[in-house]
Amino acid sequence: MSDDKVVSLGSKKKSSEEKSQEDNIVSEPVYCSFCKRPNTQVIKMVKGPGVNICSECAMIAVQYLILQDRMPSAEAQHILDAFWGKAR
């Protein structure tokens, strides 16, 4: 099963033959290192060397970094609102 929901960082590009071989292998779930949810329950998963982060945890981290010491800019607030589904 090919899983377009998992993005690997730091890996070399795979040839079409390697991708085809991967498609025939049932892959095991990839779990977020922060919230422990599998890639089957999140929008996207970023897989790194020894650590994984789902799109939801990544956005929470971004939100924390933006809001840590100051109010976000209008552009940053627009991105946060779009992610969390708030209409303006």
Image (cartoon, rainbow, N blue to C red):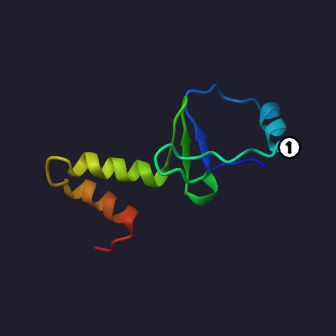
Q: Residue at x 55, y 51 (%)?
A: 44
Q: Which element is circle 1 on?
A: loop
Q: Position of residue 62 (x, y in %)?
A: 33, 48
Q: Disc 1 designates what residue?
A: 24
Q: Residue at x 78, y 49 (%)?
A: 1
Q: Amino acid at mark 1?
A: Asn
Among the 4 quarters of the image, the one containing residue 83: bottom left
**Residue extending farthest left:** 70
Q: Residue at x 55, y 54 (%)?
A: 37
Q: Position of residue 70 (x, y in %)?
A: 14, 50
Q: Position of residue 10 (x, y in %)?
A: 56, 27
Q: Residue at x 30, y 52 (%)?
A: 63
Q: Position of residue 19 (x, y in %)?
A: 77, 37
Above or below, 8 relative to 5: above
Above or below, 22 relative to 13: below
**Residue extending farthest bottom:** 87
Horizontal side of 70 relative to 66 (left or right) equals left
Viewer-side residue, 61 vs 81:
61
Horizontal side of 65 relative to 20 (left or right) equals left
Using a 10 Å C-alpha cutoff, classify the residue at mark 1 as few (fewer than 14 neighbours), some (14 to 19) or many (20 or more): few
Horizontal side of 71 relative to 25 (left or right) equals left
